[in-house]
Image (cartoon, helix red, strand yellow):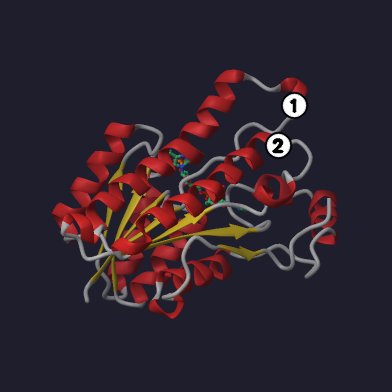
Amino acid sequence: MSKTLLITGGASGIGAETARQAATRGYRIAINYRTRDAQAKKVVADIEAKGGKAIALPGDMARDADIVRLFEETEKALGPITHLVNSAGSNGKRGRVDALDAAVISDLFAINVIGLMLCCREASRRMSTKNGGKGGVIVNVSSMAATLGGRLGSSAYAASKGAVDAFTKGFAREVAAEGIRANSLRPGMVLTEMTEGRLKDPAIRSSIEASIPMRRVGTSAEIAQAVLWLLSDESSFITGAMLDASGGGYII
Ligand SMILES: NC(=O)c1ccc[n+]([C@@H]2O[C@H](COP(=O)([O-])OP(=O)(O)OC[C@H]3O[C@@H](n4cnc5c(N)ncnc54)[C@H](OP(=O)(O)O)[C@@H]3O)[C@@H](O)[C@H]2O)c1
């Protein structure tokens, strides 16, 4: 079966690495990006240089209209979407609860939770065998923050990822008999543009690494491999699960 993979937030970090690795495994790739036009073009060029097929489509995954348009444009260009990775996400503004700001929390939940749910809606409408689709596989990129409430100052982010896990479990059960599998992948601390600012500080990096049983942060490549396994038939009996890719978790 030909495979078309749509990745939200696919111009950088975990999304971009998943795109690159998936292309070498025969997926046709659509990456969505919001502001990173040049990075998105580079991911597409890298994939094409290796003989793969990829396109890049702009869109704000916190906006319903953009999400609907993204799915329509992907299918127009590449055919039915068989696989979806929701990697677009923000870690918001770090801070203690007494400094929380309603607008900041709303923006965080708009992308990390509501946008992700709407992407699952669009995918399931198309993939469901109930609607004439051929089934499909979805991976939602959550976070280990969902398990322990996050590192100090990340409670809002942790709450958004907890919502991703709860939604994924419920959603997976709703569509399990319609040919769709959906799972959460929970990375621990991974070196990407989201975290490089903090990890650049040697003192912060060593205290973070000391809290991880494997004593190191992860790479986008390691997370992408786990995502690809969940997308593949090798995980064919797994749905509604949370897979931790975190070097053993962390101790706060
Ligand atoms: N790095 C870690 O340690 C870590 C750990 C656990 C979970 N995660 C999760 O992994 C996912 C990928 O993050 P990453 O580490 O690869 O960092 P990243 O390189 O910053 O990737 C996040 C991507 O999401 C995009 N994005 C954000 N808001 C968007 C929106 N409204 N519409 C479309 N795209 C949007 C960003 O693009 P713009 O900048 O253009 O908005 C960016 O390309 C996120 O969901 C993150 O929460 C990361």
Image spot of residue 168 (x, y percent): 48, 52
Image spot of residue 127 (x, y percent): 25, 58
Instruction: Tell me the residue at 67%/45% (across/down).
Output: 197
Amino acid bearing label 2: Ser
13 with respect to 154 (left or right): left
SS under mark 1: helix
Q: Nearer the viewer, residue 179 or 6?
A: 179
Sequence-first tag of 1 and 2: 1
Q: Nearer the viewer, residue 98 or 129?
A: 129
Q: Quadrant of residue 215?
A: bottom right
SS under mark 2: helix
Residue 146: which numbered mark, if any?
A: none
Instruction: Tell me the residue at 46%/65% (across/down).
Output: 239
Q: Quadrant of the N terminus?
A: bottom left
Q: Is residue 197 above or below residue 48?
A: above
Residue identified by numbered label 2: 155
